[in-house]
Image (cartoon, rainbow, N blue to C red):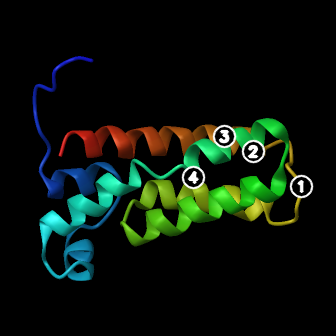
């Protein structure tokens, strides 16, 4: 694993993930350490891998549940790019089927998830 050359401050983190630092600070009682704690917990949540596996298996119910979880957690943590893409995926899985475009939308979820987790690792 390459060494990290720079660390990101929390304001820059939220700029990078499409979120609002001030909104998140208000939500978490102006405690950056609390925000970082929950962001680190997010990286350990199995929902993203569950989503990947469920989509690969064509399991719309499990994929919906995982996408919905990601959407909610992303919203609570102000990861708005991820919230938007996972929300689109949630919407198209709501009918209990995996439509053809689900895999295309998942690619954007994956990009947004990877960006968020990479940025979290720089905090």
The disc, 1 or 3, on the residue closer to the chain's N-terminal end is 3
Does 27 sit above or below residue 45? below
Q: Are marks 3 and 4 in contact (CB under 8 Å)?
A: no
**Mark 4 lies on residue:** 47
Return the mark for residue 38. Answer: none
**Mark 1 lies on residue:** 97
Q: Are marks 2 and 3 in contact (CB under 8 Å)?
A: yes
The disc, 2 or 1, on the residue closer to the chain's N-terminal end is 2
Which residue corresponds to the image point at 50% horizontal and 61% vertical from the top-left?
Answer: 83
Q: CA distance from mark 1 to mark 3?
A: 15 Å
Of residues 5 and 44, the one drawn nearer to the viewer in this rendering: 44
Q: Is residue 53 left or right of residue 73?
A: right
**Mark 3 lies on residue:** 52
Which percent across, then down, holds residue 109? 56, 46
The quarter holding residue 122 reads top left
Q: CA distance from mark 4 to mark 1?
A: 19 Å
Which percent across, then down, holds residue 6? 10, 32
Does 9 sit above or below residue 49? below
The disc, 3 or 4, on the residue closer to the chain's N-terminal end is 4
The quarter holding residue 54 reads top right
Look at the numbered disc 2 and give the secondary structure of its residue. helix
């Amino acid at each position: 694993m390459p060494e990290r050359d720079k660390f990101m401050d929390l304001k820059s983190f939220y700029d990078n993930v499409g979120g609002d630092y001030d909104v998140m600070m208000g939500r978490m009682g102006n405690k950056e350490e609390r925000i970082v704690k929950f962001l680190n917990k997010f990286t350990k949540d199995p929902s993203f891998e569950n989503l990947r596996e469920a989509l690969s298996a064509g399991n719309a119910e499990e994929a919906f549940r995982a996408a919905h979880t990601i959407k909610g957690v992303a919203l609570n943590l102000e990861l708005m790019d991820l919230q938007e893409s996972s929300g689109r995926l949630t919407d198209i899985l709501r009918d209990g089927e995996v439509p053809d475009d689900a895999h295309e939308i998942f690619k954007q979820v994956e990009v947004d998830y990877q960006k968020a987790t990479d940025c979290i690792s720089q905090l």
